[in-house]
Image (tube, grey):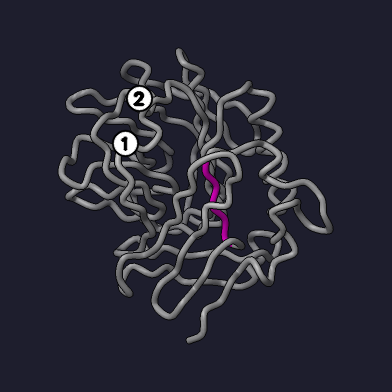
């Protein structure tokens, strides 16, 4: 199969802007950002290109053919833009970067995806491949309809329980840390989240050895059953700025 650059066929492919030179996710200065348009499929290897223009880029690729997510060129659930489906059984993309953003005491990460199956979302993870207790991940636990951000460092775990999500839901989910507090968001803006544990951000979860989409890459890998369009990590500025990003993504992907 010849390589397919998804960015070559999308109306939102320009790094300079969105469709017809309109707004771009880069207007919000993401530290790292991946989407279903900035990708290269070369045989059994899919690479999500980190197209941020402010910092170090970390491209994400599937390590083996069995880990390759399925590509859809035009997905009606996402405004007919491309998507990738992770089967929840073995598919993911990753980069073996150690200590990802380990100096950050604040930030915000966000994703657009559809929940398909299983107990994990894992649209953006950073974990240790030698220690199950070190992770930043997203799950559907303990209640089947609840969405959770989980931060684990050694024996200490923080988690937020936020919006209800059922199979087939297309959603935008985000979590921000302002240095002291967590703020959870959906496509509807700030949402009430039940929290447990103390504030913890990337600087508090040491010894991480990877980042990924589609799985939390601990020794006991947790795979995600999702159809995915974009994930990004941004500086935390304010709730208003995060909601601007959410509204940009709602418009781009046709999410109400």
Q: Quadrant of residue 80 in the image?
A: bottom right
- The answer to which of 45 and 72 lies nearer the viewer is 45
In the rendered view, does 219 fall on the left or right side of 7? left
The residue located at (34%, 42%) in the rendering is 126
Q: Residues within 10 Å of mark 2 (few under 14, many from 20)?
A: some
Q: Quadrant of residue 189 in the image?
A: top right
Q: Predominant secondary structure in magenta?
A: strand
Residue located beneath label 1 in the image: 99
The residue located at (52%, 58%) in the rendering is 49
Marker disc for residue 203 = 2
Q: Residues within 10 Å of mark 1 (few under 14, many from 20)?
A: some
Q: Gap in Å between the C-alphas at discs 1 and 2?
A: 9 Å
The question of residue 34 being in magenta is answered with yes
In the rendered view, does 72 fall on the left or right side of 210? right
Q: Position of residue 122 (x, y in %)?
A: 39, 47
Q: Position of residue 100 (x, y in %)?
A: 37, 38
Q: Give the range drawn in magenta.
A: 32-36
In the rendered view, does 56 fall on the left or right side of 98? right
The residue located at (38%, 70%) in the rendering is 68
The residue located at (31%, 18%) in the rendering is 197
Q: Position of residue 228 (x, y in %)?
A: 52, 57
Work out whether 13 lies above or below 65.
above
Work out whether 117 lies above or below 3.
above
């Amino acid at each position: 199969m010849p390589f397919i650059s998804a960015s070559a066929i999308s109306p939102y492919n320009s790094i300079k802007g969105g469709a017809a030179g309109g707004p771009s996710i880069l207007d919000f200065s993401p530290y790292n950002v991946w989407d279903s348009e900035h990708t290269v499929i070369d045989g059994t290897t899919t690479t999500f290109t980190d197209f941020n223009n402010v910092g170090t880029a970390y491209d994400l690729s599937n390590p083996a053919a069995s880990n390759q997510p399925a590509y859809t060129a035009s997905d009606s659930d996402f405004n007919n833009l491309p998507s990738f489906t992770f089967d929840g059984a073995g598919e993911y993309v990753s980069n073996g970067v150690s200590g990802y953003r380990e100096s950050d005491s604040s930030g915000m990460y966000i994703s657009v995806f559809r929940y398909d199956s299983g107990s994990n979302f894992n649209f953006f993870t950073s974990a240790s491949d030698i220690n199950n207790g070190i992770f930043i991940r997203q799950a559907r636990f303990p209640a089947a309809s609840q969405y959770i951000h989980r931060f684990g460092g050694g024996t200490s775990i923080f988690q937020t329980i936020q919006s209800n999500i059922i199979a087939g839901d297309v959603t935008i989910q985000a979590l921000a840390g302002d240095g002291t507090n967590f703020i959870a968001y959906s496509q509807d803006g700030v949402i009430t989240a039940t929290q447990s544990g103390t504030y913890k951000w990337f600087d508090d979860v040491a010894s991480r050895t990877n980042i990924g989409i589609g799985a939390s890459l601990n020794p006991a890998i947790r795979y995600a059953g999702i159809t995915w369009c974009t994930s990004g990590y941004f500086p935390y500025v304010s709730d208003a700025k995060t909601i601007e990003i959410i509204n940009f993504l709602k418009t781009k992907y046709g999410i109400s």
